[in-house]
């Protein structure tokens, strides 16, 4: 099978430019990487503490779900809160 058969025209142009050594990086790439790095660092910065009281039943359920996901339950809870406040996790009313 011809390996090029699985590429569309745009992908073939990129592949040909790569093979010819004429592929050039985007001029704004360094700034984009820097911007994304700053955003990621701000996202993962944990500089505040939150103490809440929840029912033991809810805590056990939270711990069970975290175990299913393979993460510590506090990390799982923080992830849920982060997703909710950023609109990626919506309430089902």
Image: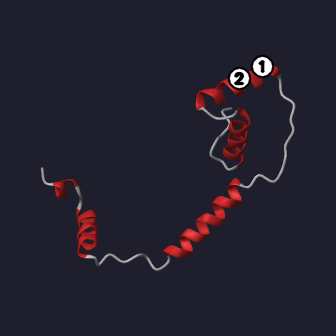
> Residue 18's x, y, as percent?
28, 71
Q: Is residue 28 left or right of residue 67?
A: left
Discs 2, 1 touching: Cβ within 8 Å: yes
- The colour scheme applied to this rendered structure is secondary structure
Number of residues whose C-alpha sits closer than 10 Å to that of mark 1, classed few (under 14), some (14–19) or many (20 or more): few
Q: Is 58 above or below relative to 81? A: above
Q: Is residue 4 left or right of residue 74?
A: left
Q: Helix or strand or loop: what does disc 2 sit on?
A: helix
Which residue is drawn at the image coordinates 68% and 32% (left, top)? 93
Which residue is drawn at the image coordinates 70% and 60% (left, top)? 42
> Residue 90's x, y, as percent?
65, 40
Q: Is residue 4 left or right of residue 29?
A: left
**Residue occupying the far top of the picture:** 57
Q: In the image, which disc is placed on residue 79?
A: none
Residue at the spot of label 1? 57
Q: Is 82 above or below relative to 59? A: below
> Residue 30's x, y, as percent?
52, 75
Number of residues whose C-alpha sits closer than 10 Å to that of mark 2, classed few (under 14), some (14–19) or many (20 or more): few
Q: Is 21 above or below relative to 43? A: below
Q: Helix or strand or loop: what does disc 1 sit on?
A: helix
Query: How much space separates mark 2 and mark 1, taking CA atoms?
Result: 6 Å
Q: Quadrant of residue 35?
A: bottom right
Number of marks in picture: 2
Which residue is drawn at the image coordinates 36% and 78% (left, top)? 24
Camera-side residue of 84 and 79: 79
Residue at the spot of label 2? 61
**Residue occupying the far left of the picture:** 1
> Residue 2's x, y, as percent?
13, 54
Camera-side residue of 3 and 80: 3
């Amino acid at each position: 099978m011809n390996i090029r058969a699985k590429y569309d025209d745009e992908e073939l142009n990129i592949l040909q430019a790569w093979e010819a050594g004429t592929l050039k990086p985007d001029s704004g790439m360094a700034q984009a990487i820097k911007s994304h790095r700053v955003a990621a660092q701000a996202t993962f910065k944990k500089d505040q503490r939150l103490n809440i009281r929840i029912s033991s039943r809810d805590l056990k359920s939270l711990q069970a779900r975290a175990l299913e996901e393979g993460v510590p339950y506090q990390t799982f809870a923080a992830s849920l809160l982060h997703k909710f406040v950023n609109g990626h996790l919506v309430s089902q009313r």
